[in-house]
Amino acid sequence: MRNVFLKKRARSLAHYHTLIVGFGLGLIILSVSRLLLFIWQFDRVTEAGNIDYLMVMGLRADVIQMGYLTLPLLLLAPLFLNRWGLGLWQKIQSIWLIAAITYIAFMEISTPAFIMQYDLRPNRLFIEYLEYPKEVFSMLWAGFKPWLFLSGVVVIGCLYGLTKIAKRLNKPAPVDNNHIVSSLIVWPLLVILVFAGVRSTLAHRPANPAFFAVTSDALVNSLVISSAYSVEYAIYNMRHEASAASVYGSVPIDQILNTVKKQPHLVGKTFPSEKHPTVHFNPASRNYDKPKNIVVILEESLGATFVKDLGGIGVTPNLEQLRQEGWWFKQLYATGTRSVRGIEAVISSFLPTPARSTVKLSLSQRNFYTAADLLSRKGYFTEFIYGGETHFDNMGTFFIGNGFQSTLGQSDITNPQFVGSWGASDGDLFNTAHQRFEELEKTKQPFFSLVFTSSNHEPFEFPDNEIELYSKPKNTVENAVKYADFALGEFIKKAKRSEYWEDTIFLIVADHDTRVYGNELVPIN
């Protein structure tokens, strides 16, 4: 009786053999990868929780991931479970096996390099960077060659091995009516099982990555799920960002305005505009014969980590020298860890949201407030100067549509001495900026310029023999910051000897600190 039962069960599942093997193989790959990542991050994982429990939670997340990959194909099965469609069904399953498992393996082999850079599994940023293949591939080639080669080897190995497995599994399945009927009978049960695995809970809402956030360490939480799951959920969120405001509470607009107007620095002010109810007038404490030029130097990743006076390692002597000659803000905090967040904060006074940066949102590409828009209406010439491609992160489109009358990028820098993965070096950028400011000074029109540097960016490429290295090897973040500071210092020296110096206010600010690492869920420090 037992043998008869097993034969009937095998006959019922015969037409799903490749799907079942792929499902199981995916679970094995994801579990082994997670175990290796746990071993690599052993101290943080054991501090955050019990490894056995985290592995079980990870397996649960993997069932969801493999269910996502399996369910669409499984739902189509009845269309092929007939005498004429079985051959095509086997081929479709073979293609699915090769594509799905290669995808899973590629995402996992890409994970360690991403973690080393961002202290998290691949996420939304992984997708956003795919929009800029030239810059990203240059960065990977310069800083992550071993991982590129390893990823290539894994992908090729997967394609070869899975093709062999698929051929072995792609044997002619029984085509008699009994087998087909058995497969159709068991189909609803398989669908229910896979659907239950995807949902993973009987609660009102199905499981999602937040369901697996079981520790206070963001990295460990990301390790519990798979990289494919993390990226897919990021894509899902990006497609539903119109509802991002729903995460906030609701307060009547009158209550908000009353709260704002009661702030100490606004007490006694008048608010003359009904259309813009927080607009008020601040009289200048000092008047000038003509408006001052304004230059904002947005320094890539130049955070307190590197500034001695702010508790850092002290590789910014030129910047710290300037604090003796100007205002020095010691309690200024970044609004995020990406350049677009720094841009929207510095140029538009805009706080970050759970959705995409405003620099990329379609409705912010025109008629969105920026300092450049305000100053252009006051007679200023406004310009953005960058050492790389201005299309990156949609900066060029955002700036031109919102008050910047000109944007200059890598192609506008004449004969740069050094070009890295992200464009011309800071030295070349500042030389171009200096030349522009001298030209603009002669026009007698006040100007506003946003100068955005890039040398302090992975893979940390900068000219040889410009600085005494802080550490070896050369291409480290500390050395890149020291070079960025050197380039800034050389620019200030030239600016001080120029005609525009006395007429210009310079604001030097980081877009954000270097990457945020650590086991705190919200790393305030």
Image (cartoon, rainbow, N blue to C red):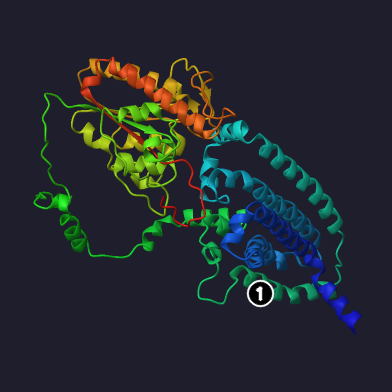
Query: Judging from the image, what secondary structure is the residue with disc 1 in?
Result: helix
Residue drawn where x is 41% and y is 55% of the image: 354
**Quarter of the figure with residue 75:** bottom right
* 303 horizontally vs 170: left or right: left
* 197 horizontally vs 265: left or right: right
**Quarter of the figure with residue 171:** bottom right
Say above or below: 398 vs 162: above
Asked if residue 370 can be seen in this view, the reply is yes
Say above or below: 141 vs 124: above
Residue drawn where x is 17% and y is 51% of the image: 278
Type of amino acid under label 1:
Ile
Q: Nearer the viewer, residue 439 or 294?
A: 294
- For the N terminus, the quadrant is bottom right
Instruction: Estimate the x, y position of residue 249 in percent, counting from the top left.
Output: 32, 65
Instruction: Estimate the x, y position of residue 456 in percent, counting from the top left.
Output: 47, 32
Pick out the residue farthest to the bottom: 1
Q: Name the residue under label 1.
A: 192
* 485 horizontally vs 187: left or right: left
